[in-house]
Image (cartoon, grey):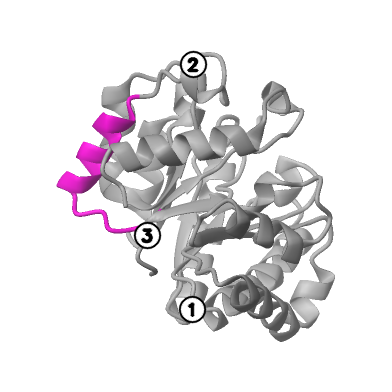
Amino acid sequence: MSGTRISCSEYSFPAVAGQHERIGIVRLLGFELVDLALFLSDGAELAAAPGGVAADLRASLTAHGLGSEDMFLAVGETVEEIAPNQRNPALRERGRQEFSAAARVTAELGIPGLTILPGVTWAEDPDGSWACCVDELGWRVEEAGSLGVEVRIEAHAGSIVAVPELASRLCAELPALRLTLDLSHFELQSVTLDRSLTLAPLAGHVHVRAAKPGAIQVRWRDNETDFAALLEALRARGYGGAYCVEYVPMPKWRCDEMDVVTEALATRSALTELGVV
């Protein structure tokens, strides 16, 4: 890791088409770490040539003088398509191939962790969807672990682990699985802080953005998440990873109604004031 523990997601700037240029924006904003993403509608190229993907990303990191502590993989157009426990066995197998390639890219870049979405609940068979989720995530933990890469899931609103208790249960069944902890998904649902902070021991990575009940992404001045309490809980557990400032201007949840650059800089300043360096 570089001298700083504050990162910024390059995928915060989707209006900029080139990933190399998005990584450059993070550098221009004064960050020394960048969270990378493989957000793809089709993973065929990734699966066929992970070495080439790694080479391109390495060149961009080198050119802009940035390090990275996390790679975020999501292949598909919808949460259901991205889910590791999607119903179609053939698509699950394809998902494994794409994940394996992404794990190789992550390892070749020396990035310690790979974040994925946890999966979805099958309305007609919730127990079956849970069992499939455990199986698929277990395979991914083993596959990535063989390359020295930690698998992290983002417990998010609408997922199979939408609340802290379910995220804890899933990690208990897969002890090597870790979380990319993002309290905004719980703040959105008015989950109380005492419940959210039980996840601190499971954090492998942290996303930071301002939120409040009913709103997953707001301006920093409107933030109601107690980040001081989160940092205290993480420090008590010896968390030594990065904190990624992650604002995404997507239409969902009205997240496209704010200036992500202004809020990213405000959030970095707030984290610095809280003692994150």
Q: Label 2 belongs to which residue? A: 222
In the depicted structure, whether residue 119 falls above or below residue 210: below
Q: Is residue 203 left or right of residue 189?
A: left
Q: Amino acid at mark 3?
A: Thr
Mark earlier in primary sequence (2, 3): 3
Q: Find the distance from the CA under tag 2 to the CA under tag 3.
A: 26 Å
Q: Residue at x 71, y 50 (%)?
A: 82
Q: Amino acid at mark 2?
A: Asp
Q: Label 3 belongs to which residue? A: 4
**CB-based contact (under 8 Å), mark 1 and mark 2:** no
What is the x, y in percent for residue 270? 38, 34
Q: Secondary structure at mark 1?
A: loop
Q: Is residue 123 left or right of residue 153?
A: right
What is the x, y in percent for residue 9? 59, 51
In the image, the segment drawn in magenta is: 226-242
Q: Residue at x 67, y 55 (%)?
A: 25
Q: Amino acid at mark 1?
A: Gly
Q: Nearer the viewer, mark 1 or mark 2?
A: 2
Examine the rendering and report whether any part of residue 82 can be seen. Answer: yes
Question: Dot 2: within a 10 Å radius of its alpha carbon, few (fewer than 14), some, or many (20 or more) residues?
Answer: few
**CB-based contact (under 8 Å), mark 2 and mark 3:** no
- Examine the structure image and report whether residue 238 is included in the region drawn in magenta: yes
In the depicted structure, whether residue 121 falls above or below residue 91: above
